[in-house]
Amino acid sequence: MRHSFFKLIPAVFLSVLVLCACSAKLSQPVQTPAPTPTTDIYASTPTPAPTPAPMPESDQRALIERSRNVWEPDLEYETWFFAITDLDHNGRLELLLASLQGSGLYTWVNVWEVNENYSGLTLCPDNTGEGEAWPDIIKETLTAYRDPASGRYTYYCEDYMRDGAAHYWTGLDSFSLENGRIDVKTLASKDERYNEQGASVIHYYDADGAEIDEEAFNNTERVAFAAQTQGTQTLTLNWTQLEKQAQTAPQPTNTVRPQVSGPVTITKNPTGESLAVGGKTWFIAHADNATSLTWLLSSPQGQSYTVEQAMAANPGLQIQVLPEDTLGVSNVPVSVDGWSVQARFDGPGGSAVTAPAVIHVDDWISVYWPVLKTYYDYSIKAYGDSPSGDITSSGDYLLSYETVGVSYLARYGGSFGYCLKDLDGNGIPELLVGSPDSEYYAGKVIYDLFTLRDGAPVRLATSGERTVYKLLSDGSIFYSGSGGAAYSVFLVYQVVDDTMILKVGYVYDDGKAYQFFESKSDYFGNHDADIEINESDLFSIREELDNSSVNFEMIPIA
């Protein structure tokens, strides 16, 4: 029986998880029992239907594409990937559809198998319950074990989920396909929480929910499959992003490229990333005249690793080779700090390797914990905006937002989330706090922006009653403030170390528009050093800046 993450956590988190991870699984057909046959002594013995001849793999792939109207998921709001393989080795292909959804990193999967008559596809039911996600199968390879007695193939993989800034869960799972049905199991799990002091508290559990020690958890795979053989060593899955207007049968990506000539030339190097423990990111590289791409990882000591070797050397690390020359990295442990990623492109004209992209990993959650805990406390207690911060006669308010130390916009409801992003490339990620579901400010508005000074959080910006900050696509910060219909200020800042430097500013002051490049305390009145511009140009610039602001992916603070 598969363990549900929801059964391992207190009830206080249940509503958050259900909202963050609505199941994308298709409904299962109702199975009705066949009627009991009656004996007819006069009936002739029916002739068994002939067994269809096996269908070539290429024809099965064409059948899968022709059946797209049957299996295609909703692509409007979520990204789905597909892979074609033969999980049970019965000669009939399966189509795996998978989507990694929500900030909790929940994987939803549908498996379709070519039916016995080779006339269509059948949805394979599984034993996951409502609200239970699959393990993380969107990986380049999975370890496969074959039971010598039954011939069944079982695939081992991990499942990583998170519930806010202070709760992480890792499952050691397996799944198998037998007689058209998927069996998903949790073999062991790891539950990690940060307490109010920012210290990590870890518990380990076996398949039945009984607590075990770390050594038993680390030996789960060896013990679970001791009686089986690694019949195929690994299952290779060529995951491809499912496109809305795909016109051809699904084929693996990052393996076949157009015929080209000329020297291989790097056109885009992957960029370094600063991550918190458990974080995720993507590396992208491009080259001209290349026919294949191989991702390479190197340790700080200079030793080179393949994707599979890097995951084995860093327990918990998840790496996925994705379409469009992209490498996905998630559940990053601190052991990856200092590692680098490179892409090697090969073609008829030779080979070329990108510059290394270095990964910096630190436990930024603990460092920023005082800020995260402030927002967490504000979200679960009856805080209001009583000016004095005292308890009112009705007991409606305990503390004001100012006394607590959260943004003014926190008063408008919704949950809170955070994002760690290195805005100036100095290896120290800034902390952006916002709301993923506020009625007015969801997604783009930065409630609070923090960085570190001497190892401690320091606030760089906070949105107010008529002032908001947004993140621009180039990492700059866009400020918009209003003092009424006749008075507005628009500023673009760049974060540099532990401060914000003005790049350019615009002011609308009583019917006239100005541009300036130096910070000042008073934007209205004296414009001797400013450059007057057209009013229409000013508001066009404001609209352009607002349109170039981007959503930042938030992890729930809960």
Image (spheres, rainbow, N blue to C red):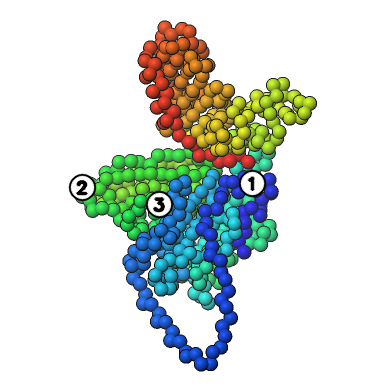
Q: Where is residue 449 in the image (x, y as percent from the top left)?
A: 54, 29
Q: Please give the label number shown on residue 262.
A: 2
Instruction: Give the foreground label among 3 and 2.
Output: 3
Q: Check disc 3: other Cα within 10 Å, few if <14, some if 14-19, many if 20+.
A: some
Instruction: Give the quadrant of the C terminus.
Output: top right
> Disc 3 residue type?
Gln
According to the image, label 1 marks what residue?
Answer: 15
Q: Position of residue 341 (x, y in %)?
A: 41, 45
As measured in the structure, the alpha-carbon distance from the residue carrying label 3 to the one carrying label 2 is: 29 Å
As measured in the structure, the alpha-carbon distance from the residue carrying label 3 to the one carrying label 1 is: 31 Å
Residues at marks 3 and 2 touching, judged by CB atoms closer than 8 Å: no
Decide which of 337, 462 is in the foreground and name it.
462
Q: Residue lying farthest left?
A: 261
In terms of image quadrants, where is residue 440?
Answer: top right
Instruction: Give the foreground label among 2 and 1.
Output: 1
Q: Which of marks 2 and 1 is nearer the N terminus?
A: 1
Q: Can residue 335 be seen in this view?
A: no
According to the image, label 3 marks what residue?
Answer: 241
Q: Check disc 1: other Cα within 10 Å, few if <14, some if 14-19, many if 20+.
A: few
